[in-house]
């Protein structure tokens, strides 16, 4: 979130006494593929099914490259949660995080994107999570919509990547998805490259 990692690094170096404690200790961040027709519909339907018969599809390309705060249930997850990153605040040095994961589909359905959430350890045996199914907090999970929904079958493997990069005063997210056919090896059903930078409208001055 914004400059929180650089701030912790700076405070740790200048103020933490030998043997001192950091609260929270660490955050672990998890990722899964999610089936979310209602959430996805809220994003694209007003632009694809408007009553005036206008073609507003260009706006959809911006909207599906934006990250959203949402809440999901465990039943909506289509893959087992995969550990994307661990932020150990006693040792973290780089505010940027990226990782690629292999996710195996656990049940048939339609994938609409990825969801990420955290588990935080405040102190020993003390912490909380905003994972699907946990009590709601002010922290919603992050939904990364795909360019288009994709039918998935049990046993299918997906290669997904997630990158968080601190630019100026906030994070920009990039996510990639590669889905191959189970019936025909080598046939790619989806190969998505998405980024918040593709979902923003910049002035020439801002681009520079």
Image (cartoon, helix red, strand yellow):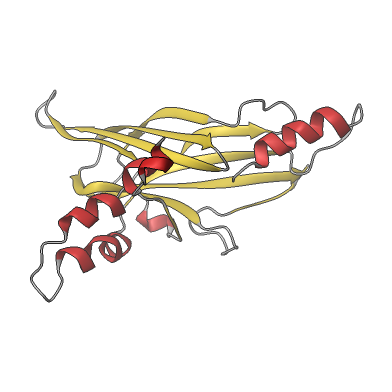
Between 203 and 75, the one nearer to me in the picture:
203
Is residue 180 found left or right of 173 in the rendered image? left
* In the rendered image, the vertical position of residue 55 relative to residue 125, given as above or below: below
> What count of labels does the image hold?
0
- Residue drawn at point x = 38 percent, y = 44 percent: 196
Between 197 and 87, the one nearer to me in the picture:
197
Q: Residue furthest bottom?
A: 51
* In the rendered image, the vertical position of residue 181 relative to residue 68, given as above or below: above
Q: Is residue 177 visible?
A: yes
Q: Position of residue 154 (x, y in %)?
A: 24, 41
Q: Position of residue 10 (x, y in %)?
A: 76, 32
Q: Position of residue 198 (x, y in %)?
A: 32, 42
- Residue drawn at point x = 65 percent, y = 45 percent: 120
- Residue drawn at point x = 33 percent, y = 48 percent: 199
- Residue drawn at point x = 19 percent, y = 46 percent: 150
Q: Is residue 80 visible?
A: no
Between 168 and 138, the one nearer to me in the picture:
168
């Amino acid at each position: 979130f914004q400059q929180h990692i650089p701030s912790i690094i700076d405070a740790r170096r200048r103020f933490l006494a030998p043997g001192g404690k950091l609260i929270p200790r660490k955050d672990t961040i998890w990722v899964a593929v999610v089936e979310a027709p209602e959430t996805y519909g809220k994003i694209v339907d007003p632009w694809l099914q408007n009553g005036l018969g206008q073609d507003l599809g260009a706006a959809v390309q911006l909207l599906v490259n934006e990250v959203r705060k949402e809440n999901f249930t465990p039943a909506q997850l289509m893959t087992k949660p995969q550990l994307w990153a661990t932020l150990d605040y006693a040792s973290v040095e780089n505010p940027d995080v990226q990782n690629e994961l292999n996710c195996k589909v656990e049940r048939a359905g339609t994938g609409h994107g990825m969801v990420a959430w955290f588990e935080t350890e405040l102190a020993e045996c003390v912490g909380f999570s905003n994972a699907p199914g946990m009590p709601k907090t002010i922290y919603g999970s992050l939904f990364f919509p795909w360019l288009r929904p994709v039918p998935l079958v049990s046993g299918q493997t997906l290669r997904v990547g997630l990158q968080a990069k601190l630019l100026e005063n906030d994070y920009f997210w990039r996510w990639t998805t590669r889905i191959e056919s189970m019936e025909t090896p080598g046939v790619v059903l989806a190969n998505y490259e998405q980024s918040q930078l593709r979902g923003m409208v910049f002035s020439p001055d801002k681009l520079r």
